[in-house]
Amino acid sequence: MSTTAAAAAIYLVHLNPMTNAHRSIILRLKKDYRVYVFPVRFIKDGQEVNTKSLPFSYQLRKQMVESVFGDSVAVLPDYSFYAPYSKYMPPLLSSRSWELRNQIITQINEEKFVSYTGDKAERLMLKAYRLNPLKADRLQVSASSIRARLYRQMVEGGDGDEEWSKKVPGAVAEIIKKNWNIVEKFARMEDNTTRVMGMKFPNEGYK
């Protein structure tokens, strides 16, 4: 892995699944920074919790990034919320939210670092946590629309690959197909996810 970059870029992200827009963002960051990708995890009793909105495990999402970028970016598990997730609320006032911030920062080798988001509200939050957000335009990541197409293909049947596979890198499409049992598992389930202050949390483990 190259260590020539003078500064690091932190990318806190869901990646459910990794899309072409995610790839574009990482490619853009790689031009100027050593990139650290932190796919979010929700942990209860030592196990990752997944839902219809958060179907793919950390290991699969790590595999998705590495299938595109190899070891040229670092993919790390430290963006992890531990049940009860409500303890991280409200942001900034919760000591556990600052512990999470420090948990992430300790993995960065470079003295200087920035963070990425295309969302204005998220940028303000990253600034408040002293994570030095870049000013960036929002790219349409559309992971939610890709999940919807995956689940529709599962429920309705037929060959719906064209609806979603062009919106993800080719290697990621192959990973999804090889792990189609995950799509089968969540396609007909309720989405047991709670949105709190703009952030999605699994219901299981929130309180």
Image: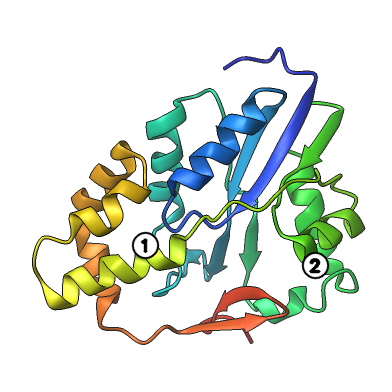
Residue 59 lies, with reference to residue 96, above or below; the image says above
Colouring scheme, one of rainbow, by chain, secondary structure, one colour: rainbow
Residue receiving disc 2? 96
**Would residue 109 be seen by someone viewing this image from the given angle?**
no
**Would residue 12 be seen by someone viewing this image from the given angle?**
yes
Q: Residue furthest left?
A: 158
Residue at image position (68%, 15%) is 3
Residue type beneath disc 2: Arg
Given contact means CB atoms under 8 Å apart, are the residues at marks 2 and 1 in contact? no
Residue at image position (36%, 40%) is 169
Distance, label 2 to label 1, CA atoms, is 32 Å
Horizontal and vertical percent position of residue 69: 46, 28
Q: Residues within 10 Å of mark 2 (few under 14, many from 20)?
A: some
Residue type beneath disc 1: Ile
Horizontal and vertical percent position of residue 173: 28, 46
Residue receiving disc 1? 146
- Front-most of 124 and 73? 124
Quarter assignment of residue 29:
top right
> Considering only order in the chain, which callout, 1 or 2, is on the residue closer to the N terminus?
2
Quarter assignment of residue 107:
top right
Location of the C terminus by quadrant is bottom right
Quarter assignment of residue 170:
top left
Horizontal and vertical percent position of residue 132: 86, 44
Residue at image position (73%, 18%) is 5
Residue 5 lies, with reference to residue 132, above or below; the image says above
Location of the N terminus by quadrant is top right
Which numbered disc, 2 or 1, marks the residue closer to the eye?
Answer: 1
Q: Is residue 60 left or right of 155 when viewed as pictured?
A: right
Q: Secondary structure at mark 1?
A: helix
Residue 198 lies, with reference to residue 96, above or below; the image says below
Q: Secondary structure at mark 2?
A: helix
